[in-house]
Image: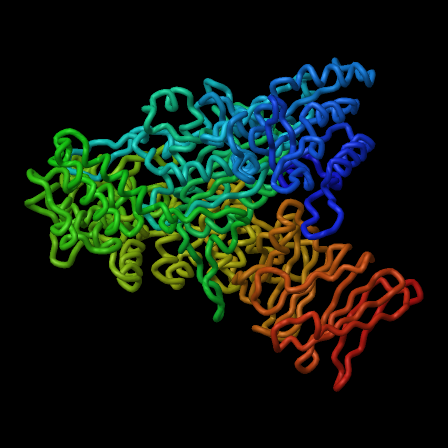
Amino acid sequence: MEQAARLGFDAPSLGVSSAGGEAEPSAAREQIRDLVLRLRQQAADRKILYWTGHGEVVSGAFYLACEDSYQEGEFEPRRAVSAEELVSWLAEDPTDTLLVLDACFSGEAVREVSHHVKDARLRAGVDDAEVGFAVVATAGSRQEALEGHWVDCLEQVLSTPDQVIDGSARIFQRENDFVPFQQLMSAVRSRTGEQVPFWQEPQTLRAWFLPNPHWSPRARSALRPEDDRSWIGKELASEELPVFSGSGESWHLRDFASRHRVVADLVDWLRIQDSGMLTVTGESGAGKSTLLAYVAHLTVAHFVNSLPEDRRPRVLPELRSVNAALHCRGRTLSTLCEELAQGLTPLGLNTAEIKHGSPHSLVQQVAALAELKGSLTLMFDGLDEAAAGHSFDIARGLLNPLAALPGVRVVVATRPNARRSLPGELRAETLLDVLHCTTVIELDREDQTEQDIARHVERLLAEENSPYWLPDAARQRGAVARQIAVGSNGLFLVATLWARHVAKRPVPSDAEQLRRELRQGTSVLDSLLAEELLRLDPQDTARIRDFMTALALAQGVGLPQPRVWLAVTNAVRAAGSREYGEEDLRDVIRRATGVTIAKDVESGEEVYRLHHPSFGAHLLGDELRQREQHRAVHRALTPRRGEDWRTTEQYVKYHLTTHAVLGGDDLLEELVGDCHFLVAAAPDILEPLVAARLSTTAQSALYLGVAGHFRRHEAEEARWAMLRATALAMFSREFLAAVPRPSSVFWDDVWSSAARLPLHRSWSAPPGGALAVHWETHGDGIIHASGAGEVKSWTAEGHEIRGRDTGPTTWAAPPRQRGVTAAGRGDSRVVATHDGLCVRMWHGNGKYPVEELYWGGTPGAVDSVRWGKEVLLATVDGDRLWLWRWDSSTEYSRAELRKHTLGVPVRCVSLLAVGGRVAAVTGGPPG
């Protein structure tokens, strides 16, 4: 019955079964006849009769044994039901019908089915051209049927969304409403083994008889144009991946095919899910970027055709069905939005309606595109490598809203430990805390990872010129591959490097020798990188190490050369080493490009970066050492005169802010105090860091007041004019006198108002806008703003703290929370919101609500107050005031929640703790 329900047969079932010890049989011939009569009387347009039990063949005729068909051990045909009778009874029904005979020797019944069906329908006057009939026998005419075997095979087929027949035909295409009967039976037959089922379709079942269990109402994929090249970012576009080795050789993306299970899991998710987010996590080197690049390339015809048969995945995504595959390295929220819009433009994205710096307007147009063209698949790699301060903004402002859209699937790759520190004693918030992911694939923790790595290494060791490639070395090759897999700590990068390393040895290494050499985790990478640096420059290894250390400290995509790269290298070079010049830089580039460093582009400028971010962990010291290095970089790149900011390098204007933050907030405060820097700096980088790191001061408030204008106006004259005008409106004449006045600002601003504008701060609102705001007057003075599906919170100094979310069940349609209140502090704090339908409550620092209160009303306002250990919460609902109270100092329990209601017409309410009592002050039509 369960499998029939998956095929759309969800009406209450009819049935009879053996009575066991009862005096009168309940599954005798007459009861079976009555059952068929009742089945014929059911008002349905599709019917299935499933018979399981014993079958007998007597004189060439097939009989289905009933409960009393065996008398004193002998089978009596007159007490059974013949196949001819059963088919005739059923065929008289003018309804599409499927008969399944799950019994021994049932194949014998199929032979004469066609003749019996036509005779019965002729007698009953049923138009056999309109009404279908099919019969399935689960075993051959001389075969016994294993109990439940055919149903088990049917369940396996229905549970395999990518089920194929004839080697390539997928029977559950998501865009097809129904499954052809013949194809489904062929798929079941492919799994039954020696028990061979037979079937006949004397009258063809109508096409809609078997609904597709994997059908989706938005299954049609939006396919990118065949000649489009803008859909994939340059970081993921290449099919040749450079290998960390002295030869500078490349590894082809085809070699990734050993990870069949992970690829199948990701592709299955893409094919089954209509919307949502899948997150791929793993430490650096686990293969996140390679997995996304591989799956993206599986939608390219020439790549799929180039795969050898033994490396072609069992499950393939639809060609051209990945609509954008982008890398977040060095991107801000704004630049990533621009790249996504550019990638979707060939598909028909309406870019004219997208406002610069407005992720919300982009999300709206992506929603319209999915509605018009079909479901979209968007991939984002390296979220943790985004520009400083932007990973969390990208997650909240772009990726989560995209994943909530109908018909939009989002795949994100990030390290699991990417985090940001929050004020006070709150634990650090990770990207996985923020992302609205419905599925997580942990690459380095998957059960099959070690076996996948072993197969991958064995393939690399079997390549020509390896001491393991000869056939007689197969056993030793397998042992070495398994040992490398064990020692790689789940990291494909480490395993690949070790495989290349041992393959270059003149003679094979046995497993015991490798066991002595291998060390766990990144220490393996340490030794390999040290060896590689020695091979790159045996005479001056420290020089290459110093230049690579500079790249390890780089922000954004990489370092331009020569001045910036040289300046950073000389600032952090090893103590006692000589100062490097341009000739040294050119020599290092010649030796290391394509080996440990890679060439890239940022803002149209050529830059260099480490080949893999894992190398940075080897080159840099502990956090204290890194802080000192960033302070040294800040000193080296800061112009000596304020006027020199206008001519400094683009890298300095964009990324010196990040070096300052990583070196200490005092450096950021020093930079913000320089108006020349404020005018020259990139607001996409500077504004989030100022808002998140600095307390409210005159300089920080001044910059936050003009940053939005600076985004829209890059001209130096326009920025100076706005900076001075804002300073005049907000601060004293003495403050304005300290703001430089370049020659381009040749006029005098006049402030006509008697009072200056108050000092103020602004922050990015939650999704959907700040629909309600609450500033705690007691407790910690936290500011809360509620929007669509989220509550964002800040300290009074302006530092954002852990936010709150309405929960996974609301991600697809985030509720617009039009009221917010908070009471208490720390672990006893209660935050509550209303969306016009229910009241939600969060306790302590919890991310999701502990309670949702529905009563069929329409709450219109909400307020709360702390009273001793208790919190009182009030909301208004037309002509009624609702009050709840509970002890918030302990874990929340609904059983402890006490409710009071007052019948009074109110529109708003405020709770006040006065002495030993709490007063509810209400307002409404009466007053």
Task: Identify the colour scheme used.
Answer: rainbow
- Image coords of residue 339 (percent x, y): 48, 34
Classify residue 682 as left or right of residue 356: left
In the depicted view, which residue is nearer to us: 665 or 172?
A: 172
Classify residue 329 as left or right of residue 139: left
Where 178 falls versus 899 (above or below)? above
Q: Is residue 85 visible?
A: yes
Where 388 falls versus 590 (above or below)? below
| In the image, farthest residue toward the front | 72
Where 67 falls versus 312 (above or below)? below
Quadrant the C terminus occupies: bottom right
- Image coords of residue 614 (percent x, y): 28, 48
In the depicted view, which residue is nearer to us: 169 or 599?
A: 169
Q: Is residue 643 visible?
A: no
In the depicted view, which residue is nearer to us: 397 or 654?
A: 397
In which quadrant of the rendered view does residue 47 lie? top right
| In the image, farthest residue toward the right | 926
- Image coords of residue 587 (percent x, y): 14, 37
Q: How many marks?
A: 0
* Residue located 60% across and 33% down the image: 55
Classify residue 502 as left or right of residue 631: left
Quadrant the N terminus occupies: top right
Where 795 falls versus 409 (above or below)? below
- Image coords of residue 804 (percent x, y): 59, 59
